[in-house]
């Protein structure tokens, strides 16, 4: 075989291509944020935890205190019940971030819509907030939600839809080629 798939080489230990300058900002200290911050560096992200609570946990900052280059940042809001939701999202929307998403149930309008509307944020900016986030894998536990979220972010950054479509296409091609 003369054509070698570079992805296959990475799976076998060859150096992965250098990732773009990735930043993941987890908003609000939560069990999901804890897992996101632990796993994201493995995927090439620099991380920050933003929590506006004056009694915030160690290491958490407000948006004004984040010194990372936010131009390539993915902002993930990990708690949609916090009273500061609107203000934090307004501040995130005012930054040059790549992507903003809020965890939540897709069957209901997110509380961020009313919160941002009440703050006078234009509808076009509110529409930049993704909800739900991540791939639909039936997540229930914080680690599952974090995994789904990170997979969805990677799919989005790589221009992919996520899911298993590539597996089905490969299987269909192999079936069409017949047995070997």
Image (cartoon, rainbow, N blue to C red):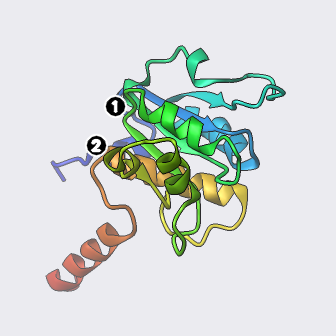
Residue at image x 63%, y 67%? Answer: 139
Residue drawn 31% across and 76% down? 168
Spatial CA span between label 2 and label 1 = 9 Å
Labelled pair 2, 1 in contact (Cβ < 8 Å):
yes
Element at label 2: helix
Residue 23 at x, y percent in the picture: 48, 29
Tell whether 26 sits left or right of 142: left
Q: Quadrant of residue 104?
A: bottom right
Q: Work out whether 171 lies above or below 66.
A: below
Residue 179 position in % (x across, y down): 22, 85
Dot 1 surroundings within 10 Å: few (below 14), some, or many (20 or more)?
few
In this rendered view, identify the residue nearer to me: 99 or 91.
91
Q: Nearer the viewer, residue 130 or 48?
A: 130
Instruction: Classify 125 as above or below 22.
Output: below
* 15 to the left or right of 42: left
Residue 17: assigned label: 1
Give the numbered dot on residue 6.
2
* Residue 44 in view: no
């Amino acid at each position: 075989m003369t054509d070698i798939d570079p992805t296959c080489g990475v799976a076998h230990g060859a150096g992965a291509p250098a990732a773009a300058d990735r930043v993941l900002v987890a908003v609000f200290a939560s069990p999901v944020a804890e897992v996101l911050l632990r796993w994201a560096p493995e995927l090439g992200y620099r991380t920050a935890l933003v929590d506006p609570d004056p009694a915030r946990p160690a290491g958490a900052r407000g948006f004004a205190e984040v010194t990372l280059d936010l131009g390539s940042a993915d902002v993930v809001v990990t708690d949609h019940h916090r009273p500061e939701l609107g203000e934090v999202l307004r501040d995130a929307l005012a930054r040059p971030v790549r992507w903003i998403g809020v965890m939540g149930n897709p069957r209901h309008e997110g509380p961020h819509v009313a919160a941002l509307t009440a703050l006078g944020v234009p509808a076009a900016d509110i529409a930049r907030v993704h909800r739900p986030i991540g791939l639909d894998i039936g997540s229930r536990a914080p680690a599952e939600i974090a995994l789904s979220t990170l997979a969805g972010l990677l799919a989005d950054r790589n221009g992919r839809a996520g899911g298993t479509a590539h597996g089905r296409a490969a299987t269909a091609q192999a079936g069409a080629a017949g047995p070997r």
